[in-house]
Image (cartoon, rainbow, N blue to C red):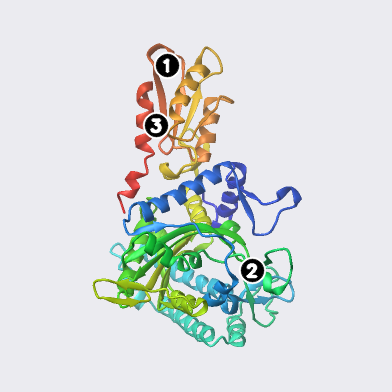
Amino acid sequence: MSNQAPEEVFKSIISHAKEYGFVFQSSEIYDGMSAVYDYGQNGAELKKNIRDYWWRSMVQMNENIVGIDSAIFMHPTIWKASGHVDAFNDPLIDNKDSKKRYRADVLIEDHIAKIEGKIEKEVEKAAKRFENFDEKMFRSTNPRVQENQKKIDDINARFKDALEKNDLAEVKQIIVDLEIVCPISGSRNWTDVRQFNLMFSTQIGSVTDESNTIYLRPETAQGIFVNFLNVQKTGRMKIPFGIAQTGKAFRNEIVARQFIFRMREFEQMEMQFFVKPGTEMDWYNKWKETRMNWHHSLGFPQNMHRFHDHIKLAHYANAACDIEFNFPFGFKELEGIHSRTDFDLSQHEKFSGKKLQYFDPEDNESFVPYVVETSIGLDRMFLAILSQSYKEEKLEDGSDRVVLNLPAFLAPIKCAILPLVKKDGLPEKAREIMDVLKYDHLCVYEEKDSIGKRYRRQDAIGTPYCITVDHQTLEDNTVTIRERDSMKQERIAVDKAASIVSEKVDMRAALKKL
């Protein structure tokens, strides 16, 4: 594993993503667009496989969850009802010296993260010194840890109070009092904090006027809420039930950074779970556990994820938390789980004049359901998987390799078919094997360069298995199958290759862990 600093590792991941066809800067030949990216041939496949895994685990594995695909263009009153027109804002602040713009809340959160880093260093040092180390006891008794934890608690309490009162002057004062500097200029010469609405607006129809103004959706959830009754009635769904959706959303992020972590055009995977009022907290806790198990099913270390309760609840929520992932730039939000109460359906009832209620035949009553939401960014999930899978290794023979240890069922290419040389009938035999496997898996045929270089390229792409056709293949109809992570090679019969690859890259093993 690389000994590089996290920020250097992140740069390597970004470079690797471009070099091997995962992510490109959008409109690159025209000098690109900030915070807009295209997915290359391998990135598009990885993204599709992540989406498929989420969909199968959410819809296919749950009898009471169905999926829809709502339009990006929606009636503009929907966004008035949801609160996005009036309240979908970020607090922004500029540094007068660097002319750079920042989200004020992110500046404060990054400052808190630095203090948390000091605590973690103290814990790591103590853990190395003491054989029977009690981390919980150490955190509760060590003076330096306690002092830093108090700083964090005080900042959070003050920040929460400022947000709840929408006191932007106090938000700026927190930044000033914490002596937070601009990462570019190093100065503390800040402007006042102001709110900025994140929705993109456009016109629909042939006449450009205010009455024709619509918005590109900033989330996919509202398409689910306005279709609640359509799905419930046509699917004869009974409470509790869920509606899932994946799709593009758009936010005019002024402070877009950290590669594909925060983009202006991104994809969400959301599920709204409709429940009887009074049961929402039980379902909220159940979905917290369920979603964390989903992340763990990918086989990554459990300490890479953590729950983070929201300091300030959104206007629609009575409980909310994030599942955070330890990206190379620190723990950041990967998925949100929210108890949205009946806010959305009630608001759409109010603004549309239509009833959006569920009739419970058992209790003979109608009510507006409460909602528990799980919402994950597909692009962030892509980045999390890429970050966790990227490895730089020093091999026993002294050579180096870069490998993506992707879960096999998520890998863009499942198997590479490689003739040892480009003659003696080996390419023809390799093509025969390729023609069998390609019906079940995305495979590649490659004959350029030495076999060692081809192995390295497939490792870098994350291909879990390579099948090499050599002269012995023509004699006894066997091939060498090579496993990516261990680099172990095994001789197998050609007629068993399809079943062996299928078994090793099957998604069902991960689904059964849920």
Residue 206 in the figure: left or right of residue 258: right
Name the residue at 56% across, 50% down. 13
Please tell me how crowded label 2 is: few (under 14), some (14-19), or many (20+) other residues with Cα within 10 Å.
many
In the rendered image, is residue 1 in sight? no
Mark 1–mark 2 Cα distance, whole angstroms, equals: 62 Å
Q: Which mark is residue 473?
A: 1
Report helix, strand or loop for mark 3: loop
In the rendered image, is residue 438 in sight? yes
Residue 130 in the figure: left or right of residue 415: left
Residue 216: image x %, image y %? 61, 64
Name the residue at 55% across, 42% down. 42
Q: Tell me the residue that label 2 is attached to.
A: 214
Q: Tell me the residue that label 3 is attached to.
A: 488
Residue 127 in the figure: left or right of residue 203: left
Please identify the quarter of the rendering in which residue 7 is found. bottom right
Please tell me how crowded label 3 is: few (under 14), some (14-19), or many (20+) other residues with Cα within 10 Å.
few
Three-letter amino acid code of the residue under disc 2? Ile
Three-letter amino acid code of the residue under disc 3? Lys
Which badge, 1 or 2, is on the more N-terminal residue? 2
Mark 1–mark 3 Cα distance, whole angstroms, equals: 18 Å
Residue 217: image x %, image y %? 57, 65
* Tags 1 and 3 touching, CB below 8 Å: no
Label 2 vs label 3, nearer the camera: 2
Q: Which mark is residue 421?
A: none
Q: Is residue 498 above or below residue 238?
A: above
